[in-house]
Image (spheres, rainbow, N blue to C red):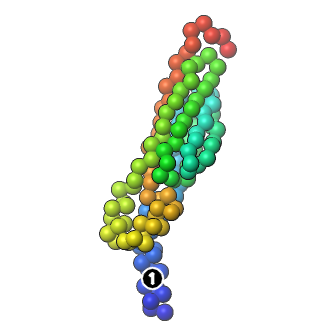
């Protein structure tokens, strides 16, 4: 019984990022000066998602960055990337939780984070009338 309790304690502490940071994250997507642009978000981690700006969307964390493509009539298309990087807590997790903690956080996506916001530039097309 003691061994089970100890193992459960190690697993709880080991998955530090999963517990403290979670496996999802809100990201704000904006197209400054262009309201109601339609944007498609794509990555291996989230699949494909379509939103209308301005928007805040909750994404499943993943090691894959998210490609963003926005369009609206009479504006140039806008492209951008919501970059994925490693949470700072991962280094501490390796020390405290070892391989178990790292494996739990890696499999849940919790060891990753996205930029909290992105602004996609779109320019008006001269002479275009909506």
Q: Quadrant of the C terminus?
A: top right
Residue 25 on image: x %, y %: 51, 51
Residue 63 on image: x %, y %: 47, 52
Mark 1 lies on residue: 7
Give the vertical position of 102 relative to 71 (above or below): below
Can residue 62 be spotted in the picture? yes
- Considering every residue shown, the one lying at the far right of the view is 130
Can residue 20 be spotted in the picture? no
Give the vertical position of 32 relative to 68 (above or below): above
Q: Residue at x 62, y 16 (%)?
A: 74
Residue 18 on image: x %, y %: 47, 64
- Considering every residue shown, the one lying at the far top of the view is 127
Q: How many marks?
A: 1
Q: Residue at x 60, y 33 (%)?
A: 39
Q: Nearer the viewer, residue 55 or 128?
A: 128
Q: Residue at x 32, y 69 (%)?
A: 95
- Considering every residue shown, the one lying at the far front of the view is 44
Q: Nearer the viewer, residue 85 or 130?
A: 85
Please, what secondary structure does the residue beneath circle 1 have?
Answer: helix
Q: Residue at x 62, y 23 (%)?
A: 72
Which class describes the residues within 10 Å of circle 1: few (<14), some (14-19), or many (20+)? Answer: few
Left or right of 45? Residue 91 is left
């Amino acid at each position: 019984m003691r061994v089970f309790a100890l193992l459960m304690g190690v697993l709880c502490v080991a998955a530090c990022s999963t517990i403290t940071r979670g496996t999802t994250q809100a990201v704000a997507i904006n197209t400054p000066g262009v309201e109601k642009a339609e944007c498609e978000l794509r990555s291996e981690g989230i699949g494909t998602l379509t939103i209308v700006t301005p928007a805040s969307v909750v994404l499943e964390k993943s090691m894959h960055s998210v490609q963003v493509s926005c369009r609206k009539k009479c504006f140039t298309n806008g492209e951008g990337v919501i970059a994925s990087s490693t949470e700072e807590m991962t280094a501490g997790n390796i020390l405290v939780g070892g391989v178990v903690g790292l494996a739990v956080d890696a499999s849940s996506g919790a060891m990753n984070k996205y930029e909290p916001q992105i602004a996609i530039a779109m320019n008006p097309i001269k002479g275009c009338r909506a």
